[in-house]
Amino acid sequence: MSDIIHLLPDSVANQIAAGEVIQRPASVIKELVENAIDAEAQEIHVLVTDAGKTCIQVIDDGKGMSETDARLSFERHATSKIREAADLFALRTMGFRGEALASIAAVAEVELKTRSANEELGTRLLIAGSRVESQEAVTCPKGCNFSVKNLFFNVPARRKFLKANSTELSNILSEFERIALVHPEVAFYLYSNDTELFNLPAMPLRQRIMAVFGKKLNQQLLSVEVNTTMLNVSGFVAKPETARKKGAHQYFFVNGRYMRHPYFHKAIMEAYEQLIPVGEQVSYFIYLEVDPGNIDVNIHPTKTEIKFENEQAIWQILSAAVKETLGRFNAVPTIDFDTEDMPDIPAFEQIRSVEPPKVHYNTDFNPFKTSSSSNGGGGNYSRPKVEWEGLYSGMEKASKLNSPLEEEPPVNVHWTLPESSSSVAKEEREVYMDKGARHLQFKGRFVLTSVKSGLMLIDQHRAHIRVLFDRYIHQIRQKQGVSQGVLFPEIVQLPASEAAVLESILDDLVAVGFDLSPLGGGSYAINGIPSGIEGLNPVDLIRNMVHTAMEKGNDVKEEIHKLLALTLARAAAIVYGQVLSNEEMSGLVDKLFACPSPNYTPDGRTVLATIKEEDIEKLFNK
């Protein structure tokens, strides 16, 4: 039998390793910028073209490399960070495995210009697909200049799975923000298609956070500082009143490295228990300094997951540190009896006599006396006639005008739902026949109405979501959104990573009725909002739509349309507990049955349920 096991060529092995380390253009920037930081660079420039698909350039003023080091750095597992296995447990550098440059060179065309401080000439190296094409001496500044072109040019399947430019740029900005937040002593500059997105000179940590996420965050942050024998904790947490459902900036850093840690996240949230509503989040920037021997960063290719030796003890330290911060800055509501500004309470003096208050009144006042009397001021008095009915005239008309359930033409939109949905809807359309029937609102949540098969219960909030969703999706597709101008435009400020997502969905926002004008620096003026959502906070609404788009990561236009329509519908739908008149309930039920799929919300939740007549009769058979 012939042998079937053989060694892979280096080029194939490098492509396999690249699949773990280099997932997208943001991964390239992460690896190159971290190498620049390890080289003690004080100024790093990042330039991307077409969200990194065409070209990524990283320029630093670090130590640079000699001719031999430059050639050797692209070999697999070639590193200057470790020499033996024991060094893995004393790491204080960002990179150490020596896979980054080899992986990048395996799936892209790389040009490197580098020079160390003690050399007059530098080295220019060209590599494509792990194959060295040329190496020569050149004149160049001290440091390194990496140019990575045509990422995944030799792996078409991987390049096909790259997202749209806006999504990839958002990932680049998110990765860039994480590195900039942990190294405030280094100057960072980022350019996209020759447009400057970040200009971050060296500055203190608090100022770096504000430079990345906006100055408004400065008023929300409380500093955390705790030193123990196990670890040192520093950073900032936000005040409880700034909590929100989406868009909180939450970052953990360990020994200068960004990490994700759901267990420690729960420790932070536990400190805010009963201070913020359930389901909402607060921003935090937590920096941990731990003995490298007590952590393991070598458990994930991207090194974003870190294993700790004493996680439970660190959990308790984190929670206690945040609680102490909230208490020290009076972020927790308390009753303090030791304040110096206590009101002065006069002492009781028995010598002083107490006099009762005197009441002054007009003895000639008579509420029944008119200005002119028919009997010359005699005793025949009569109360003036008041037209009470006139005070309520027009109330019924005003109620109808202020109702958010105006009649809209039915929208012919088809969605994929369970088969039972269309059959139930078809049956109950003809069931709802008595147009003059009165409806009953139960517990401020359900609308009860009589149908042929029994008693129908309709969730008023979900029903309105169903109606509004069909309306908004029709407006977006037909670009017929009606915009309502605002008297005083509001400003929404977004970080660069969120502003890139907003740009990708801006046309859809305009189609539904938003009128936004860019002001530069991630700021937009809201000049108009969609008609029908008056009373909602447009700034929070736009933020929620951007964050939802970031979470979903959808690039297909149809998915973006559904996402925007559903977000708007949820925000503008009538809430639980809102009292509805019979006319409003009738209008809601009529519009619901006019929808192609009234049984379910767009995200698959049940809108209505029917209690059959025979089931009701069984209750009275006893």
Image (tube, grey):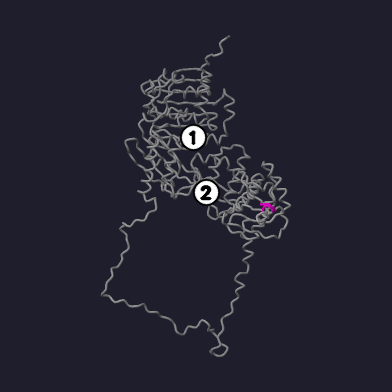
Residue at (49% x, 28% y) in the render: 28
From the viewer's perspective, tell me whether residue 22 is left or right of residue 613.
Answer: left
Which one is in front, 79 or 458? 458
Which residue carries the number 1 mark? 191
How many other residues sit within 10 Å of disc 1, few (<14), some (14-19) or many (≥20)? Answer: some
Q: Is residue 154 magenta?
A: no
Secondary element at tag 2: helix
* In this view, 619 is above or below 115: below
* In this view, 362 is above or below 139: below
Q: Among all residues in the image, which is located at the extreme top?
A: 1
Numbered range of the magenta stretch: 611-615
Residue at (45% x, 45% y) in the render: 282
- Residue 1, image x and y in percent? 58, 9
Earlier sequence position, callout 2 versus callout 1:
1
When asked about the image quadrant of residue 237, the answer is top left
The amino acid pointed to by label 2 is Asp
The amino acid pointed to by label 1 is Tyr
Question: Considering the image in quadrants, where does the C terminus appear?
Answer: bottom right
Q: Among all residues in the image, which is located at the extreme left?
A: 351
- Residue 155, image x and y in percent? 57, 24
Q: Main secondary structure of the magenta part?
A: helix
How many other residues sit within 10 Å of disc 2, few (<14), some (14-19) or many (≥20)? Answer: some
Q: Which mark is residue 550?
A: none
When asked about the image quadrant of residue 454, the answer is bottom right
Which one is in front, 301 or 132? 301
Q: CA distance from mark 2 to mark 1?
A: 28 Å
Which residue carries the number 2 mark? 540
From the viewer's perspective, tell me whether residue 386 is left or right of residue 93.
Answer: right
Secondary element at tag 1: strand
From the viewer's perspective, tell me whether residue 432 is left or right of residue 97.
Answer: right
Which one is in front, 327 or 599? 599
